Image (spheres, rainbow, N blue to C red):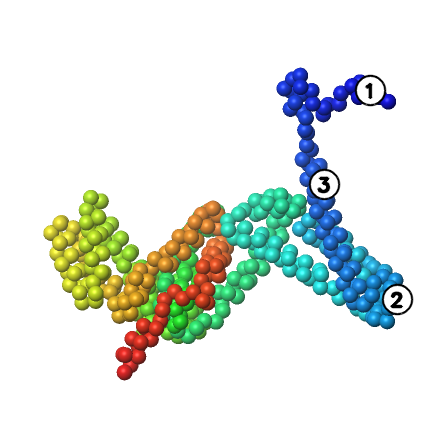
Amino acid sequence: MKDINEKTPKSTVTPSTEESSNEVVRIDFNNLKRDLSGFVRGTVEEALNGMLDAEAQSICGAGRYERTTERQAHRSGSYERNLETGAGKVRLKMPKLRGATFETQIIERYRRREASVEESLVQMYLAGVSVRRVEDITEALWGTRVSPSTVSDLNQKIYERIEQWRDRPLRSRYVYVYMDGLWLKRSWGGEVENVSILVAIGVNEHGFREVIGASEGMSEDKESWKNLLTELYRRGVREIDLVISDKASGLVESLPEVYPASKWQRCVFHFHKNILHRVPLAKREEVAAMLKAVHAQEDAASAREKAESVVLKLQAMRLSAAGKILAEGIEETLTYYRYPREHHRSIRTNNMLERIMKEIRRRTRVVGSFPDGKSALMLACARLRYIASKSWSDTRVYLDMKRLEQQEREKAS
C-alpha cells in the first residue's frame, strides 16, 4: 500500500504557512454554475415527463403491460419534442396511444406558469430596469439570457393589455373627479423634450375610486385636456358633479365645453402655495395660519368674510401681492362647501392624486428620458393599474355617499 505521507496534494491543509491555508478550498464557479443549470434542467425534464406518463396512464385506464377490463387504450411508443423553459431547453417524451387521443394539459399549465415569469420580466422593465439589466437578472436566476427582442415582444403584449384597460367602458356618472398632470422626458430627434401625462381618478356614486383616464399630451394646454375629457365622454361618462384640480387654465377652459353642468373646485393646498410664494420666508408661518383659518370656517359665507379680513391684514403687512391673489381666487376654492361636510377634507384639495403622481415620478426617475411618449404613458398607466389593484378594492369605500344621497333628496323635495 502506498504511504499517504509520501506526497501531499495541493488541496491538503498544511499548517506551516498562512499561504497554504488560503488554498484549502478552490471553487470553479463557472463549472458550478454549469452543473447547477444542468441539474435544474434535468429535474424539470424528469418532472414533466413523469407527469406526461401519468396522464397517459390515466387516459388508458391501466398501467404499462397491465391486463384489465377497464383499459380504454393502449400505448404505442412516444415521440420527442423540445420545450423552452426558464431552466433551458428540455426534451419531452410525448406518449402515443392507440384507441384514444392524447391531449395533454401539462404543457399548457407549464406555459401559464412561464407566462407569470414573462409578466415579471415586463414589470421589471416597466419599473425602470434597463433591458441589459433584465438580461443579467434572468441569466443569474435561470441560467439563460433573455434577448432584447424577447423583452420587446413581451412589452408589446402588456402594451396591448394596457390599451384595452385605458379604453374600457365607464359608468355614466362620477360624483367627484380628481385631475392632474405630470411632466416626463422623452427623446426626440436627438434632443430631450417634455411630455405631459394627464390623469383622471373618479369617485363613483357608491364611493369607490377608479382610474378613469390617462392620456399623453404635448403640454397641459386646452387641447390636451379637452382630448382627455372627450375620451371620458366617448367611453360613457355623461355626468361629472365636481372636478378637483389645481388651476390648470387648459382644464378650466375646456371643462364647460364637454361637461357644462360640472362644477370646479380649485385645490386649496395649491392655492395656499401660490399665495405663500409672494410672502417673505420670515412671515410665511404666520400667513399660512391665517390662510388655514379661512378654509376652516363652517360655511362659504363665513369663509368669504374671513378672507376679506385676511386680505386687509396682508395689506397692512405690506403683502399686497399675496392679498391680491387671495381676493381674486378665493371664490374658486369654496365650491366644496356645497357638498356634505363629511367629504370636505377629501374634496377641497387634490392631495390624493398628488400622492399617486409623486409615486409615478419616483418610479420613472430611474428611466431618465423615454424613447417616445407612448412608453412614458404605458409606464405611468402600469403604475396606476398596480396602485388601483393593490391599494383600492370593491370592498374599500373611499367616501360614504349616504349623506350626499340624503342631501340630494332634500334638494329635490
Q: Which residue is mark 1?
A: 3
Residue most toward the top? 16
Compare marks 1 and 3 and give the one earlier in the sequence.
1
Name the quadrant of the C terminus: bottom left
> Is residue 287 shown to the viewer in this render?
yes
Name the quadrant of the N terminus: top right
Amino acid, disc 1: Asp
Crowdedness of circle 2 by 10 Å Cα count: few (<14), some, many (20+)? few
Q: Position of residue 360 (x, y in %)?
A: 43, 53
Amino acid, disc 3: Asp
Q: Can you say whether 96 is above or below 188 in the image?
A: below
With 50 as the anchor, is 315 left or right in this view? left
Secondary structure of residue under mark 3: helix
Q: Which residue is mark 2?
A: 67
Crowdedness of circle 3 by 10 Å Cα count: few (<14), some, many (20+)? few
Single out the mark in the foreground, 3 or 2.
Answer: 2
Amino acid, disc 2: Arg
C-alpha span from label 1 to label 2: 61 Å
Q: Position of residue 133 (x, y in %)?
A: 57, 44
Between 310 and 275, which is closer to the camera in this rendering?
Answer: 310
- The label shown at residue 35 is 3
> Is residue 254 shown to the viewer in this render?
no
Compare marks 1 and 2 and give the one earlier in the sequence.
1
Single out the mark in the foreground, 1 or 3.
Answer: 1
C-alpha span from label 1 to label 3: 34 Å
Compare marks 3 and 2 and give the one earlier in the sequence.
3
With 138 as the anchor, is 259 left or right in this view? left
Q: Position of residue 214 (x, y in %)?
A: 44, 62
With 140 as the anchor, is 219 left or right in this view? left
Residue plotted at (54% across, 50% down) = 124
